[in-house]
Amino acid sequence: MNRRKLVAGLAILAAPALIAASQALPRALQQAQPGLWEISDPSGDRRTQRICFRDLSAMAQVEHRGRQCTRVTIKDDPRLAQIHYTCVGGGFGRATLEPVTPRNFRLVTQGIDGGLPFHHTLAARRVGNCSN
C-alpha cells in the first residue's frame, strides 16, 4: 500500500471521531445550562446584550452571532475551553471560555469580522431561561 492511500485511509477512519469531538460540548461548559445569558464588557466599550444560547458552545462566536459557522474545540479542559470557528461567507474567530461559576464565564474572543480584526474580553452571566 502506498503512503498516500494509507494517509487517505487513516483520514477516512478518523473523520467520524473528529466530527464527534468538534460537536461535543467542551468540559468547561458542561456544568452550565443553556438559557438567557447576559454578555457584558467590563471595560464599557460594548453595550450589554442578552442572548439566548440553546447551545452553549455558540457563546464562542458571540461576535458572529446568528451566522452559520463551523466550530471546532481546540482545547477541552474542565477549567478552560478554546473554540475556533469559521463562518460561511467570511469571518472567523477563536474564543477562550473560562468558567468562574456554572452561571458565570470569562470570555476572550478575537478574530476577523467584516474584514476587520476584533479582540474582546467579556463577562457572560446566566440570567434565566429563553422565552421560547
Image (cartoon, rainbow, N blue to C red):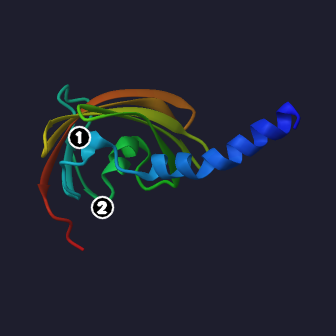
Which residue type does callout 2 highlight? Arg
Q: Nearer the viewer, residue 35 or 112?
A: 35
Please, which residue is most extreme toward the bottom here?
132
| Picture quadrant where residue 79 is located | top left
Residue 89 placement, left or right of 54: right
Q: Position of residue 72 (x, y in %)?
A: 48, 42
Please, which residue is most extreme toward the right here?
2
| Picture quadrant where residue 44 is located | top left
Q: What residue does disc 1 label?
A: 47
Mark in the foreground, 1 or 2: 2
- Residue at the spot 24% in from the left edge and 74% down from the top edge: 132
Please, which residue is most extreme toward the front here?
1
Q: Position of residue 124 (x, y in %)?
A: 20, 41
Describe the element under mark 2 as helix, strand or loop.
loop
Residue 97 to residue 18: above or below: above
Q: Nearer the viewer, residue 27 or 67?
A: 27
Which residue type does callout 1 highlight? Arg
Q: What residue does disc 2 label?
A: 54
- Residue at the spot 20% in from the left edge and 51% down from the top edge: 37
Q: Is disc 2 surrounded by few (<14), some (14 to 19) or many (20+) residues within 10 Å? A: some
Q: Position of residue 47 (x, y in %)?
A: 23, 40
Q: Nearer the viewer, residue 56 or 111?
A: 56
